[in-house]
Image (cartoon, coloured by chain):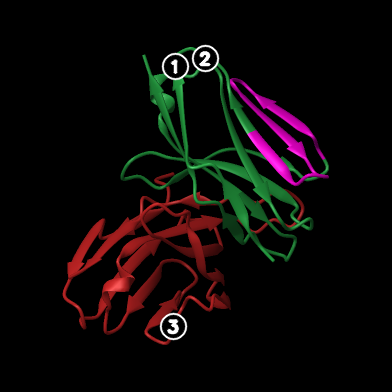
Amino acid sequence: GEDVEQSLFLSVREGDSSVINCTYTDSSSTYLYWYKQEPGAGLQLLTYIFSNMDMKQDQRLTVLLNKKDKHLSLRIADTQTGDSAIYFCAESFSGGYNKLIFGAGTRLAVHP
Amino acid sequence: DTGVSQNPRHKITKRGQNVTFRCDPISEHNRLYWYRQTLGQGPEFLTYFQNEAQLEKSRLLSDRFSAERPKGSFSTLEIQRTEQGDSAMYLCASSPADYATNEKLFFGSGTQLSVL
């Protein structure tokens, strides 16, 4: 079945690193994504990783993928107040189009 | 590039009324998706269009819901006889068709529906 799970809340101090975790169930997923949603806005694609990779770095963002454990994480270095948002993990499938299955989201709160 | 546009941004309606939402995708994108997001949850897939053809519908899409994309450009999502349980954010996304590379979805800001 298709299921993506995330912890619901994370609080960090400004300047620290944030690590948001996600587990998924379908081993046939081809891509895994991280989206960011700010209040009243749609979803913004942050980064993604192909399922045959184990790490991807993009500026302050590092994605780690443990395919054996079906575990995905997003690390945000030097977290800023502007990073406060809800972060969604999503998996997709190789069915010829990009149907995404989303987790419930992790609310990241950054405090001074 | 103006991004994915959705109208209206907010809709308040009484139970039993019909509502229609519109999505204008990015102009060169031939794939269009509708998702629904309820409070505290991630978006849930509703339906998908490749050009004007509706190729998949979720079981979440009851008979009261209908989506169209008549000319393969903009799309409409209609809900008939609305119920309070239909209250949610309705998100539209588009992407170019490209089987060779990762397909990124670009989301609109959504239409927030409140059924009283």
Q: Are marks 1 and 2 in contact (CB under 8 Å)?
A: yes
A66 horizontally vs B37: left or right:
right
Q: What x and y, as percent, mark residue B1?
A: 44, 44
On the same chain, marks 1 and 2? The answer is: yes
Specify the amino acid type for callout 3. Answer: Ser
Hue of chain A?
Answer: green
Q: Secondary structure at mark 3?
A: loop
Question: Which image quadrant for residue A77?
Answer: top right
Q: Quadrant of the N terminus of chain A?
A: bottom right
Protein chain holding label 3: B
Q: Which residue is at the front of the view, A70 or A89?
A: A70
> In the rendering, which numbered label is found on residue A107?
none
Q: Is residue B64 above or below residue A31?
A: below
Please name the residue that numbered disc 2 is placed on. Answer: A16
Q: Is residue A15 above or below residue A52?
A: above
Whether residue B41 appears in magenta in the rendering, the answer is no
Name the chief secondary structure element in magenta: strand
Whether residue A61 appears in magenta in the rendering, the answer is yes
B73 horizontally vs A90: left or right:
left
Specify the amino acid type for callout 1. Answer: Arg
Q: Is residue A88 above or below residue B42?
A: above
Please name the residue that numbered disc 1 is placed on. Answer: A13
Q: Which residues are magenta?
A: A53-73
Give the residue at x 56% y 77%: B53
From the viewer's perspective, is the residue at label 3 or at label 1 nearer? Answer: 1
> Which chain is displayed in red in the rendered image?
B
Q: Quadrant of the C terminus of chain A?
A: top left
Q: What x and y, as percent, mark residue B58?
A: 54, 75
Please name the residue that numbered disc 3 is placed on. Answer: B62
Specify the amino acid type for callout 2. Answer: Asp
